Image (cartoon, rainbow, N blue to C red):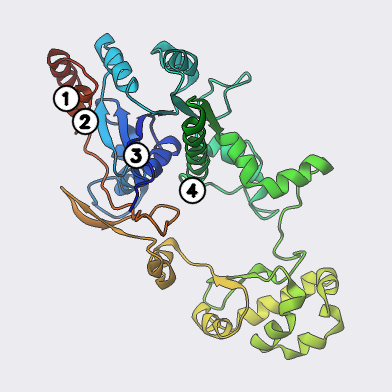
Amino acid sequence: MAIPLEGIRVVEIASFVAAPACGALLADLGASVVKVEVPWGEIYRHSLPRFAGYDSEFPIAPPFQMDNRGKRSLTLDLALPEAVQALHRVVAKADVVLTNMLPARLEKYGLDAERLLAERPELIVARLSGYGPEGAEANAPAFDYSSYWARTGLMDQLHEPDVPPAFQRPGMGDHSASLSLAVGILSALRTRDVDGKGQVIDVSLQHIGFYIEGNDAAMTLVTGESPPRHDRRAPRNPLWNHYECGDGRWISLVMIESDRYWAAFSRAIGRPEFETDERFSDGVARYKNGPELVAFLDETFASKTLEEWTEVLGAQRLIWAPVKTVAEAVVDPQAAANGSFPTVQHPEHGAFQTVAPPLTMSGYAMDGTAPAPALGEHTAEVLAEAGVDDETIALLVAAAS
């Protein structure tokens, strides 16, 4: 099989999730990705399950493994002038520089896009930031919790009217941003094949939030109004709602074209009289009488457990899903059938499952099973490839140990 990014060299100067996740995708596609880390290792590398509240002694950080698979690790203490010079030599052989370092720090180390492109016009510089390269907050630090979740309206929107705002789970905005960053890099590589010129790719977590909530943001832009929050007690479409089952578990109905499914749904839940009830005869009637219908459906779904409803609704061609816990979801047979959770064979810690890359290719195997590198595992090797002399390599390896 042809390897999509064979021969492409990426230097990743980044930490945490979004930019490294992009680097992992590029490595999945066959690029050689060098991850530049501080000598003590970034916090994400040390984020063990027990630190996040899991009752587990698993000895490495599973999310770090997922977002740094297949890379080589170069540890440098950039407080040393020799380390900065060595990094420049590594960058000089790269096709892509991938970073989420703030602009002021990039400039401090001579790694700003303007300087890099002046020296090598064919280079592609891919930058991930919280708020974009322009404006007063271009140098503002951010996580997706702040710039993607809270700042864009997502946090305010995704909760019922009478409960506090929802708390984002780790990496939601970051992994969305990583996909956009990878698309930009692949596009820039394609255009460079044509004209030989590099360029700068910018992705901000704030704008990714607007893109992810694009349906709502587009509506708000033309109306000037924030979208009405979903209220499950009075939804616009009671068949696009969630209901509690008799065992306290929940079920999600997603029949957006409600008229198409109403008759079959009414029969499936044992309420055939609903099919001809004037109060619920079409989508408009169900909207007008939504609170009354929701009350009926609350009573109906409370009459059986989630397992019982799964059997009942599973026999019909309806659009719905059980609301699963993450522990249940990762053993879903449908996910297994599509290879969502491949097994990594780690050289020190044995076998464990991880999350596969977000796409498959019929002409190229991409299973995401490569382990992340040990801290500084490839420092001497990468520096030697860049032409750094043996004495400086020894100095930098010693400084990073």
Pointer 2: what residue?
A: 376
Total marks drawn? 4
Foreground disc of the pair 2, 4? 2
Q: Quadrant of residue 132?
A: top right
Foreground disc of the pair 1, 4? 1
Pointer 3: what residue?
A: 31
CB within 8 Å, label 2 to label 1: yes
Direction from residue 86 to residue 305 in the image, left or right: right
Of callouts 1 and 3, which one flags the residue occurring earlier in the amino acid sequence?
3
| Residue pictured at 66% horizontal, 45% vertical | 156
Image quarter where the C terminus lies is: top left
The spot of residue 95 in percent (x, y) is 39, 28
Tag 1: residue type?
A: Ser
Compute the Cα span from label 4 to label 3.
29 Å
Compute the Cα span from label 1 to label 4.
34 Å
Of callouts 1 and 4, which one flags the residue occurring earlier in the amino acid sequence?
4
Which of these two is toward me, 245 or 380? 380
Of callouts 2 and 4, which one flags the residue occurring earlier in the amino acid sequence?
4
CB within 8 Å, label 1 to label 3: no
Secondary element at tag 2 = loop
Tag 4: residue type?
A: Arg
Decide if residue 356 is in sight here.
yes
Compute the Cα span from label 2 to label 1.
8 Å
Foreground disc of the pair 3, 2? 3
Which of these two is toward me, 317 or 296? 317
Pointer 4: what residue?
A: 169
